[in-house]
Image (cartoon, grey):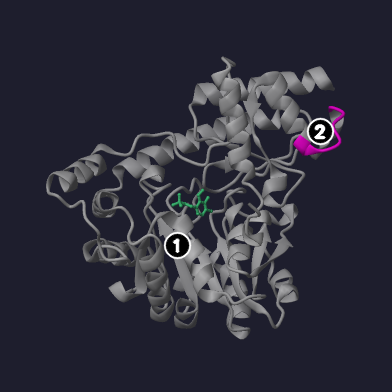
């Protein structure tokens, strides 16, 4: 059967493709090190597991309201007050099946055919595809590596047309780990207000910051920006809960209402017991979150140093998330490869190290390495990459 056009034009996720290849090699008995993962390698903290078990024992295993259980919404409003000093009511919150589905539903709700969304590159792989699925046009704006991959006000201004509906801000960023400062957000925000653009602020890596920089949500900067922003966040990365599929959106009531209506006809509700687990996560102490962060920071320091010792690798130190995004175009050419994609393929074949080529994120000179794996594995991986480069030079 001929599939619908919307599916035919989808670009398969490069992250998943490389992970699948690495898994297949592993299944054949090869000693593969996968640095492609987009999820923390820690177990979900036990107090969260206990809350889910208790919910099951208490029979909380039925449909819930489409937008999430009221007590979880309350705990999300408390989190937004605590961390962002922002005030939301329950009507401004929707609990979703992961942050990914919050974004998916949001684009369905705000876009008409031909509407444009500005997506700074490098970008998280799902943004352009989700926009296309909502019949919108992703307008990819390459941010300069020299500017730490941050969109400038001039670039934003130059990309706005009569069709522009929204802009995505992802800070800290996947794949680059960079963060916008308050001043930078203010400058971008002013332009958004001037043109009436909605700001989609993806803050999923908010808790994973390794510098003195403070996470700032663009919604914090003025009442006008608060009214023009939808915050996307969730427990996946902060509490090592990727498989539970709980995220949320916080924003203007009418948008959240539209999203809730959409959810009532698509997911019905996020899994009931996962919602109780997320409630425990938001109500609990952040001791475990901080422990994970400490481990990530140590890994970042080690891997960053090792990468810089590899010929041709250029890599600014990221501020947050759990990825490094080095420019390796010189390394590729030193090794005789015409593209970074070819280098990545050969590295997996020969040394069994899986990285994600930057082409999937709109940045073909770079690769993404996730340090959500043990220090030993990271050291071994860096050693193998170095050996590979020395062999091909
Ligand atoms: N936004 C960004 C930038 C991400 O990297 C991810 C996950 O990789 C998500 C959203 C989706 O998170 P979730 O697992 O909660 O759907």
On whether residue 337 falls in the magenta region, the answer is yes
Q: Is residue 278 left or right of residue 214?
A: left
Q: Could you tell whether 342 is left or right of 355 in the image? A: right
- Residue at image point 46% right, 55% down: 204
Q: Position of residue 220 (x, y in %)?
A: 44, 72
CA gap, disc 2 and disc 1: 37 Å
Taking the spot 47% from the left edge, 79% from the top edge, the residue there is 222
What span is in magenta? 335-341
What is the quadrant of residue 391 in the picture? top right
The answer to whether 195 appears left or right of 171 in the picture is right
10 Å crowding of disc 1: few (<14), some (14-19), many (20+): many
Q: Residue at x 35, y 34 (%)?
A: 43
Farthest front residue in view? 1
Q: Which mark identifies residue 102?
A: 1
Look at the magenta stretch and give its main secondary structure.
loop
Q: Which mark is residue 332?
A: 2
User: Can you tell which mark lies on residue 186?
Assistant: none
Image quarter hosting the C terminus? top right
Number of residues whose C-alpha sits closer than 10 Å to that of mark 2, classed few (under 14), some (14–19) or many (20 or more) = many
Total marks shown come to: 2
317 vs 143: above or below: above
- Name the foreground residue: 309 vs 256: 256
Q: Is mark 1 within 8 Å of ligand 1?
A: yes
Residue 298 lies, with reference to residue 275, above or below; the image says above
């Amino acid at each position: 059967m001929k599939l619908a056009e919307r599916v035919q034009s989808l670009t398969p996720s490069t992250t998943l493709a490389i992970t699948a290849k690495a898994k297949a090699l592993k299944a054949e008995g090869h000693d593969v090190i996968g640095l492609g993962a987009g999820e923390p390698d820690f177990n979900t903290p036990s107090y969260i597991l206990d809350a889910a078990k208790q919910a099951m024992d208490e029979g909380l295993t039925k449909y819930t309201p489409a937008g999430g259980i009221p007590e979880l919404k309350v705990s999300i409003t408390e989190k937004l007050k605590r961390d962002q000093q922002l005030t939301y009511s329950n009507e401004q919150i929707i609990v979703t099946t992961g942050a990914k589905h919050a974004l998916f539903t949001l684009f369905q709700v705000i876009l008409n055919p031909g509407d444009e969304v500005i997506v700074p590159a490098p970008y998280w792989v799902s943004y352009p595809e989700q926009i296309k699925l909502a019949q919108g046009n992703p307008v990819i704006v390459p941010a300069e590596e020299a500017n730490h991959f941050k969109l400038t006000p001039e670039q934003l201004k130059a990309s706005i047309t009569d069709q522009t509906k929204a802009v995505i801000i992802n800070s800290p960023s996947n794949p680059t780990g960079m963060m916008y400062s308050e001043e930078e957000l203010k400058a971008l925000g002013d332009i958004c207000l001037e043109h009436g653009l909605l700001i989609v602020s993806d803050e999923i890596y908010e808790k994973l910051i390794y510098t003195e920089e403070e996470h700032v949500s663009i919604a914090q900067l003025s009442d006008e920006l608060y009214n023009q922003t939808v915050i996307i966040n969730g427990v996946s990365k902060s509490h090592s809960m990727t498989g539970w599929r709980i995220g949320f959106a916080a924003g203007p009531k009418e948008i959240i209402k539209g999203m809730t209506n959409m959810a009532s006809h698509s997911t019905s509700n996020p899994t009931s017991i996962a919602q109780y687990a997320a409630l425990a996560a938001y109500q609990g102490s952040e001791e475990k979150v901080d422990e994970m962060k400490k481990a990530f920071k140590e890994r970042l320091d080690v891997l960053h140093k090792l990468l810089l010792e590899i010929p041709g690798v250029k890599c600014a130190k990221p501020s947050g998330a759990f990825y490094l995004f080095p420019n390796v175009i010189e390394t590729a050419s030193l090794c005789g490869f015409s593209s970074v994609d070819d280098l990545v393929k050969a590295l997996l074949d020969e040394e069994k190290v899986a990285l994600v080529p930057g082409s999937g994120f709109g940045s073909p000179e770079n690769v993404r390495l996730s340090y959500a794996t043990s220090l030993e594995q990271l050291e071994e991986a860096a050693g193998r990459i170095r050996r590979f480069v020395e062999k091909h030079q």
